[in-house]
Image (cartoon, rainbow, N blue to C red):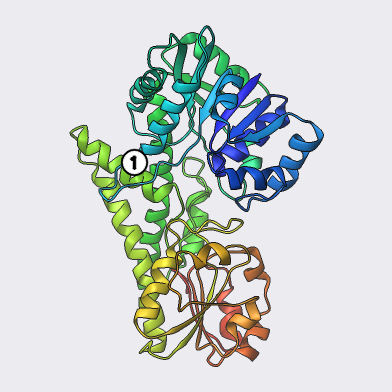
């Protein structure tokens, strides 16, 4: 099948490469010509494990993948056109659909007459956006007679494991008010053996928000439980293990820590709160979820202050900047909030992250110092603070760290270290909800 992807971010580029690997002929469009040229050369705009090799395979060996800045070429190519552009939150928390509007109008402008196409929103969009997409495609087409249907196919990819997720999805959700569109869209995913949920388009749009909001709720819940653990002597890791073995609950997203970040959970929670209010409903649970998540960031600085006292002139080693491991994404990363507060209090910050340093430099205060490895980050530090659970952090020698630091203090906001081992080595150790 001929597939067009509008946008080459995490969702668009990964989806396009995976679709091509399944045997579809794919054109990915991006209006940034520099990005297009880089992808053609094998330079990826994002860090995602396996993506560079996959793009090389489908682009240079299989010849089923092409990236372009030519809207006309891209739109004419696709039987199915996926809109995979950003929907960032605005100041009020609502989803900003400006990029979706632009994409829809450009699709209409370049859509040829006497052909049928399915225009699909894969971006996370509020309920009712399909009507807006339909009108914008028509607006872009002007007086042309075009034939198309709109559909929704939300993505459920996790940064860091998106290629695996695309090939091993729990389900594929497709929504449209056209059976013809649903049949065609189902054909894109016929390679998968997981269930395809065919539904009306409004339900499909809401499913993604419901899923993300529920997962964010699990994270905030276990962070609240960690507060009870710290006050009662219980261990949140043991509590989460006991909870997660219940098949009705499951173990995922029950890791207490610094809260959720990234490009999805923060904006999607706020967007669902926003459009729920517009629909006449006050979503009290989600308002609490958001509040708890904001508090989790503030507790990091409080833990550091409890251990050091005044932060002025203290040397603080930060391990991890990205909002999660195996990605270089700094969007809404808790580290931004934490480091900004530490610097404001007069501390010096030396940070290390295996992948996100370049992206971090664009969003963190200039006073942040970037180390080349773990050991140069912790050298002469008054305290070591873990903000991202990179695998290499859990494997590092605590004894080696002990030799390098000025003071043996650890605030472990991802519970990557063994508290008993750290204390045995002489560290003053604080985790999240741990004894």
Quickly name the residue at label 1: 95
Which residue sits at x=75%, y=45%? 53
Q: Nearer the viewer, residue 128 or 291?
A: 128
Q: Is residue 189 visible?
A: no
Query: Is residue 49 toward the left or the right of residue 343 in the image?
Result: right
Which residue sits at x=61%, y=64%? 390
Give percent across and percent down for residue 351: 54, 75
Q: Nearer the viewer, residue 413 or 363?
A: 363
Question: Can you tell which quarter of the image residue 376 is in?
Answer: bottom right
Which residue sits at x=69%, y=30%? 20
Q: Nearer the viewer, residue 11 or 202?
A: 11
Q: Secondary structure under badge 1?
A: loop
Crowding at mark 1 (Cα within 10 Å: few <14, some 14-19, many 20+): many
Question: Can you tell which quarter of the image residue 268 is in?
Answer: top left
Query: Is residue 19 toward the left or the right of residue 236 in the image?
Result: right
Give percent across and percent down for residue 26: 66, 28
Q: Residue furthest left?
A: 280
Q: Is residue 229 above or below residue 103?
A: below
Q: Is residue 22 visible?
A: yes
Give percent across and percent down for residue 294: 33, 61
Q: Nearer the viewer, residue 299 or 337?
A: 337
Query: Is residue 367 toward the left or the right of residue 425 in the image?
Result: left
Q: Is residue 10 above or below residue 393?
A: above
Q: Is residue 326 above or below residue 16?
A: below
Q: Residue furthest right?
A: 61
Query: Is residue 267 toward the left or the right of residue 239 in the image?
Result: left
Q: Is residue 202 above or below residue 320?
A: above
């Amino acid at each position: 099948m001929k597939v067009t992807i509008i946008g080459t971010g995490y969702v668009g580029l990964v989806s396009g490469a995976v679709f091509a690997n399944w045997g579809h002929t794919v054109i990915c469009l991006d209006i940034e010509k520099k990005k297009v040229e880089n992808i053609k050369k094998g330079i990826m705009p994002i860090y995602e494990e396996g993506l560079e090799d996959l793009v090389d395979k489908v682009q240079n060996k299989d010849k089923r993948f092409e990236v372009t800045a030519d809207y006309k070429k891209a739109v004419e190519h696709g039987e199915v056109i996926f809109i995979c552009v950003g929907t960032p939150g605005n100041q009020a928390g609502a989803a900003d659909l400006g990029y979706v509007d632009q994409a829809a109008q450009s699709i209409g402008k370049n859509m040829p007459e006497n052909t049928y196409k399915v225009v699909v929103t894969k971006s996370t969009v509020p309920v009712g956006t399909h009507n807006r997409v339909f009108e914008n495609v028509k607006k872009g087409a002007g007086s042309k007679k075009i034939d198309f249907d709109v559909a929704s196919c939300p993505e459920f990819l996790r940064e860091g494991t998106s290629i695996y997720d695309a090939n091993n999805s729990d389900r594929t959700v497709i929504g449209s008010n056209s059976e013809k569109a649903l049949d065609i869209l189902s054909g894109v995913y016929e390679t998968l053996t997981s269930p395809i949920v065919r539904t009306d388009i409004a339900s499909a749009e809401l499913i993604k928000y419901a899923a993300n909001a529920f997962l964010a709720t699990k994270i905030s819940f276990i962070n609240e439980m960690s507060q009870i653990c710290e006050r009662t002597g219980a261990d949140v890791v043991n509590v989460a293990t006991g909870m997660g073995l219940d098949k009705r609950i499951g173990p995922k997203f029950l890791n207490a820590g610094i809260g959720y970040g990234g490009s999805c959970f923060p904006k999607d929670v706020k967007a669902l709160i926003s459009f729920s209010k517009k629909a006449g409903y006050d979503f009290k649970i989600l308002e609490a979820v958001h509040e708890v998540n904001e508090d989790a960031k503030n507790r990091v600085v409080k833990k550091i202050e409890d251990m050091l006292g005044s932060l002025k002139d203290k040397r603080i080693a930060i391990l991890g900047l990205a909002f999660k491991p195996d990605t270089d994404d700094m969007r809404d990363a808790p580290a931004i909030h934490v480091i900004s507060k530490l610097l404001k209090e007069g501390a010096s910050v030396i940070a290390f992250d295996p992948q996100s340093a370049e992206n971090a430099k664009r969003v963190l205060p200039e006073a942040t110092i970037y180390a080349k490895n773990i050991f140069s980050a912790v050298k002469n530090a008054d305290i070591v603070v873990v903000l991202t659970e990179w695998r290499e952090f859990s494997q590092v020698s605590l004894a080696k760290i002990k030799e390098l630091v000025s003071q043996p203090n650890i605030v472990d906001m991802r519970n990557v270290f063994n508290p008993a081992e750290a204390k045995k080595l002489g560290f003053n150790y604080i985790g999240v909800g741990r004894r």
